[in-house]
Image: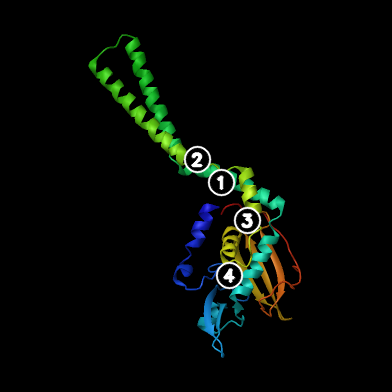
Amino acid sequence: MQKRLKINAQAPARGKAKVDYLLSQKLFCGHCGATMTGESGTGRLGGKYHYYTCSTRKRYHSCEKIPVKKDFIERAVVEDALSILTPEVIEELAEAAVRQNKIDIENESLVPALTQELYEIERSIANLIKMVEKGADSDALTTRLMELEKQKRATEKRLVVAQDEIIVLEKEHIIWWLTEFCNGDIEDEDFRRHIIDLLVNSVTVWDEPDGWFKITSVYNLTSSKTSTFRIPSGQGSDLSNLAPPEKRYSENCIVFQ
């Protein structure tokens, strides 16, 4: 999870923009499939507006997808993402995090390599001792044995340091953290950013004939892979009166892509 947050936080469009478009590189037009990019505009009365617009519509004027207000779509996506974080899903996330943590430790830490190196050194020392016990005695053997003992001590110190740097995730702690995390303030943009970075893989939005938006969110890390819902396209700031998701379905599990 930490790696995913780090990668998403470094999305190119974010670093250059004065306004943080939380769905940058994740929001797509349902009509033509193009990415929807963050834009700013000034109204007739001088007010500043931030929205996402279809890149095909912007560049080629060949798509009729209407722009979507930034705060409106981001909040709708976060509210839906929070709705999937049931206790069962939180436990699933915790189990996935623990599994990935073990894989990362095995594949990315120095511990396995240093452990193998220490094993080889100890085996060489044991072989030399056997030779001495069988009567072999020479300055070369003594010198080599001293060198190996020195290498062993150095490798043991490096192994201790590498083991101290390992962060082992405990399932119970992750469950506690995620449960507390879900109680964050949705009005806080940092909170919304973390939810999107952690859970949301992509979002596709369509203009519906009845004036509503249809939105499909694809999630990371959970068995609730895909959620499709509809919201009115008034794009007001208060989304508390939105209708519940019209349709929701899930597909096979995706864990830490």
First-in-chain label (4 vs 3): 4
Q: Which mark is residue 100?
A: 1
Q: Which residue is mark 4?
A: 27
Q: Residues within 10 Å of mark 3 (few under 14, many from 20)?
A: few
Left or right of residue 188, residue 132 in this image: left
Secondary structure, mark 3, is helix
Disc nearest the viewer among 1 and 3: 3
What's the amino acid at mark 1?
Answer: Gln
Disc 2 crowd, CA 10 A, few/some/many (<14, 14-19, 20+): few
Residue 7 at x, y percent in the picture: 49, 58
Residue 200 visible from this viewpoint: yes
Secondary structure at badge 4 equals strand
Q: Residues within 10 Å of mark 4 (few under 14, many from 20)?
A: many
Q: Position of residue 51 (x, y in %)?
A: 57, 78
Q: CA distance from mark 1 to mark 3?
A: 20 Å
Mark found first going from the N terminus, 1 or 4: 4
Decide which of 113, 173 is in the foreground and name it: 173
Examine the rendering and report whether any part of residue 253 can be seen: no
Above or below residue 10? Residue 125 is: above
Mark 2, residue position:
106
